Image (spheres, rainbow, N blue to C red):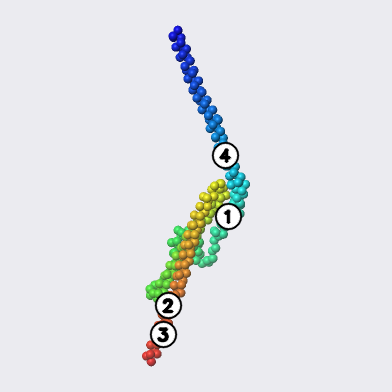
Amino acid sequence: MVAILLVESGCLAPRLAHGQFLSVFDSIFSSIQTDMGGALKAINQIKQQVQQLYQTTMWPLAALNQARGFVSNSINTYRNQMNQIFTTKFSSAVLPGPQQFETLLRSRLSTQIPSLQTSFTTNYGTVPQANAARPQDRVMMDMDDALSQQNLKTTLIADQAQDVTLQAANVMENEVATSTPGSNPYLTAEAQIVNLRCQAYMQKMLAAQLRQEAGRIAHDNALVKSRTNASGSVNSMVTGALTNH
C-alpha cells in the first residue's frame, strides 16, 4: 500500500511543478500584453504624432521637394555657364616668348612658379651689370622686378585656390539638392568654412595689391629724389662756375 502511494505521489509531483511553471509564464505574458503593451502603444502613438508634425509643419515634404527641385534646376541651368566664365582662356600675346609667359601665367597651377620666373626674366630682361647702370637704378630695377614677380606668383596661386573653392561650392550645391531634414546646420557650417577660406584668399590678394602700390609710390619717390640730387649737382656746378669768374 505504501509503495502504491509513493508511485502516485511521484507521478503527480511533476505535473504540479509543470503547471506552476506555465502559470508563471502566463502571468509574464499577460503583464507584457496589458501593462507594458499599453505603454508601448502609447509611445508609438506619440512617435507617430511627432513624425507627422515634422512632415506636415516643420519639414513639409512638398516644400522640401520644391527646394530640392529649385537647386537642381539652378545647377542644370547655370553651372556650365559659370564654369565657362571661370575657365575661359583669354590669350592676347602674339610673339612666342610672351605667349609662353601668358600661358604659364594663366595655367592656374602653383607648380609652374619656377617656369613663370624664368619666362619673366626672358621677356622682361635681367638687371644690368654694375658698370652698365647707376647703382641706384640697378636697385630700383631689382625691386620692381621682385615686386612684379611676387604679385604674378600670388595671382597664379590665387587662381588655383579659386578652382578649389569652386569645387567646394559645387559639392555643397550637390549636397543641398539631396539634403535631408535636419542637415541644414551642417551645410551652414560647411559654407561658413568655405567663406572664411575665400576671405583669407581675398585678404592675401589685397595685401599683394598694397605691396605693389607701396612699391610704385617708392619708385616714384626715388625718381623725385634722383631729379632733386641732379638739380642740386647742376646748381652747384653753375654756382661754382659763376664764383670762379
Label 4, secondary structure: give it.
helix
84 left or right of 155 in image: right
Q: Are marks 1 and 4 in contact (CB under 8 Å)?
A: no
Which residue in the protein does label 1 denote? Answer: 79
> The N terminus lies in which quarter of the figure?
top left
Disc 1/disc 4 C-alpha distance (Å): 44 Å
Task: Check disc 3: other Cα within 10 Å, few if <14, some if 14-19, many if 20+.
Answer: few
Q: Are marks 2 and 4 in contact (CB under 8 Å)?
A: no
Q: Earlier in the sequence, mark 3 or mark 1?
A: 1
Disc 3/disc 1 C-alpha distance (Å): 67 Å
User: Percent position (x, y) of residue 161?
Assistant: 49, 58
Task: Give the amino acid at mark 4.
Answer: Ile
Q: Is residue 17 above or below residue 121?
A: above
Q: Earlier in the sequence, mark 1 or mark 4?
A: 4
Q: Earlier in the sequence, mark 2 or mark 3?
A: 2
Residue 129 seen by the camera: yes
Along the line of sight, which residue is nearer the eye, 65 or 140?
Answer: 65
Which residue in the protein does label 4 denote? Answer: 46
Disc 4/disc 3 C-alpha distance (Å): 100 Å
Instruction: Please name the residue shown 44% across and 75% down the image.
Output: 221
> The C terminus lies in which quarter of the figure?
bottom left
Along the line of sight, which residue is nearer the eye, 31 or 193?
Answer: 31
Which residue in the protein does label 2 denote? Answer: 225
Q: How many marks?
A: 4
